[in-house]
Amino acid sequence: MTTPESRMSQRSLLMVQSVEGRAAGRSWDTRGENKARRLGSVAPWAEGKVLPAGRIIEALESLIAPGDRVALEGDNQKQADFLSRSFAQVDPKEVHDVHLLISSISRPEHLALFERGIARRVDFAFAGPQSLRVAQLLEDKKLEIGAIHTYVELYARMFVDLTPNVALVCAEKADADGNLYTGPNTEDTPTIVEAVGFRRGIVIAQVNELTDELPRVDIPGSWVDFVVVADRPFAVEPLFTRDPR
C-alpha cells in the first residue's frame, strides 16, 4: 500500500531522473567549446601562442565571428595599431556586424571598419580627431552608437553587460608563453585583458619584441591566447606617462 509520502518520494525521484537525463545531453561549457573551436582553427600554423605576422589577417578572420563584441585597445595615448590596421583589412563576408568597444576613436582605420561593413555598432568615450567622420558615418547609417561613456564606465561595463568576445591589445614585449611586459605605458591593457579572459574570450596582443626573458610580467600568459610581433612599434603619444629611464 502506497502512502502520500511514498508517492511524493517517487515523483521526486522521477523529476531528478528527468533532469539528469536532459542534462546528460547538454553542454555546460558552451563558451569554452566555442573558444576551443576558434583557437583550433589557427593551431595548425601558429607556433604555440605566437602568430606569424604575415597571416594576421587570416587569423583575425578565423578568431573573430560575425556579431562579436571586439575590444580594440586605442586610448588617447597607446594604440594597438598593427592589429587595428589588420582588422580593417579582413573580408567583410567573413567578419561583419561587429560591436566595437574602444575608449578613443583616434585612427583612420578605426572608422574604416564601419565604412567597409566589418563593424556596425560602437561604444566609446572620445572621438576628437575622428569626430567629423563619426558624424558622417552616423548620418549615412553606417555606424550605430551604443553609448558615449566616461572611460571608467566603459571599462566597468566590460565586466557586466558589454563583455567582449575578443580583445586586440598591445604591449612592449612578450615571451613564447604569452606573458606580457607593458613597459612604461600600461594604460588600460590589463583591464581589457582581464574582462575578456574571465569571460572565456580570446586575447590577441601585438608586441614590439618577442624575447626569452622579460623585465617583469605585467599580464600573465594564462590570460593571453596569442601574441604577434608587429611590423613597427605600437603608436603611442605619451601625454601623461614617460619612460622613467
Image (cartoon, rainbow, N blue to C red):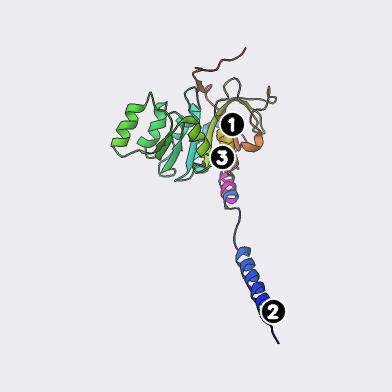
Mark 1 to mark 3 CA distance (whole Å): 10 Å
Write the start and end of the magenta stretch as one range: 33-50
Q: Position of residue 161 (x, y in %)?
A: 50, 44
Q: Which residue is mark 3?
A: 196
Examine the image and state in which quarter residue 191 appears: top right
Instruction: Find out whether the residues at labels 1 and 2 contact each other: C-beta distance under 8 Å.
Output: no
Name the foreground residue: 231 vs 207.
207
- Residue type at tag 1: Pro
Examine the image and state in which quarter residue 243 appears: top right
Q: Which residue is mark 2?
A: 6
Q: Is 37 left or right of 89, judged from the image as shown? A: right
Q: Position of residue 149 (x, y in %)?
A: 44, 33
* Any part of residue 48 in sight: no
Instruction: Find out whether the residues at labels 1 and 3 contact each other: C-beta distance under 8 Å.
Output: no
Report the quarter where the C terminus lies: top right
Mark 1 to mark 2 CA distance (whole Å): 57 Å
- Judging from the image, what secondary structure is the residue with disc 2 in? helix
Tag of residue 190: 1
